[in-house]
Amino acid sequence: DIQLTQSPSSLSASVGDRVTITCRASRSIADYLHWYQHKPGKAPRLLIYAVSSLRSGVPTRFSASGSGTDLTLTISSLQPEDFATYYCQQTYSVPWTFGQGTKVEIK
Amino acid sequence: EVQLVESGGGLIQPGGSLRLSCAASDFTVTGTYMSWVRQAPGKGLEWVAVIYNNDATDYADSVKGRFTISRDNSKNTLYLQLNSLRVEDSAVYYCARVEPKTWYGMDVWGQGTTVTVSS
């Protein structure tokens, strides 16, 4: 199984801060890496697919990059509505797996 | 509006069975990939199962042999049959559409249905 390890597990940040979340895969997952935002009581939301493709309707302050086993999600200027938990996910091979999540909290 | 609505969750005793439903609107579950994902209390997202466009299926090891994913084309509904339930199966269960054009990202999600396994 492919393991995805996110870091940090949580972070505190202020509105306007630049935030970076890392996802490391236990082996190469090509372009089959996606990022989701999840708020309590809500459905998860696909933000980025195929490593770096911004989904239509997602604000451009969200971006992602990486290759092979090291992937990164960046929020360029944190907004109040961005406080949530973020997950990476691989769909390169079954079982599809998620990272453990990164909780972004208000400082 | 493209939408998924889950139902069927509830309180069930260990060893019991439950069937979750996921009704789709404005797209057909036929011929597309659909998946179930769960989140146990205080835990992260866990992938559970997928049904492919050819009706083949795959499961997480933790549910293999106990859960069955299926769909009813006439009702445009996805199902997850949960058998031999364990306390550790307690979670919010989400259904999601898997979009091949996004390298199999999950682009539409339901709001979730809660399963509680307890005696």
Image: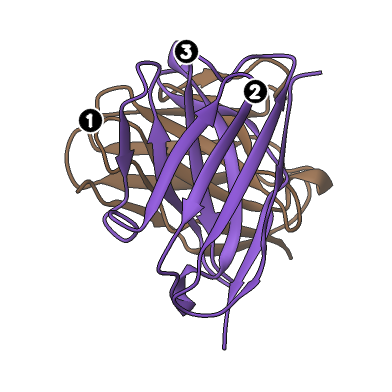
Chain colours: A brown, B purple
User: Is residue B26 found left or right of B66 in the rendered image?
Assistant: right
Instruction: Give the residue number, with chain letter if any, for mark 3.
Output: B31
Inspect the image, locate mark 2, and give the three-letter code of the amino acid beneath it. Asn
Mark 3 and mark 2 lie on one chain; the one further toward the N terminus is 3
Give the residue type at disc 1.
Gly
Q: In percent of the image, x 57 and y 52: which residue is there?
A: B19
Label 3 is found on which chain of the structure? B
Give the residue displayed 69% in from the left and 47% down from the top: A17
Towards the viewer: B87 or B65: B65
Please tell me which residue is depicted at 41% across the width and 25% down the height of the picture.
Answer: A51
Evaluate whether residue A102 shows in this view: no
Q: Is residue B58 above or below residue B7?
A: above
Q: Which chain carries label 2?
A: B
> What residue is shown with label 2?
B76
Q: Which of marks 1 and 2 is in front?
A: 2
Which type of secondary structure does the marked residue at label 3 adopt?
Answer: loop
Q: Distance between the residues labelled 1 and 3?
A: 31 Å
Q: Residue at the location (70% across, 24% down)?
A: A58
Q: Are marks 1 and 2 in contact (CB under 8 Å)?
A: no
Q: Is mark 1 on a helix, strand or loop?
A: loop
In the rendering, which numbered label is found on residue A68? 1
Q: Where is residue A10 in the image (x, y as percent from the top left)?
A: 55, 64
CA gap, disc 1 and disc 2? 38 Å
**What is the count of numbered marks?**
3
Question: Is residue A2 among what the camera can see?
Answer: yes
**Mark 2 neighbour density, 10 Å: few (under 14) some (14–19) many (20 or more):** some
Give how far across and how far down residue A33 sits, in percent.
Answer: 38, 31
* Mark 3–mark 2 distance (CA, rounded to whole Å): 11 Å
Residue in the foreground of this view, choosing between B54 and A87: B54
Disc number lying in front (1 or 3): 3
Amino acid under label 3? Gly
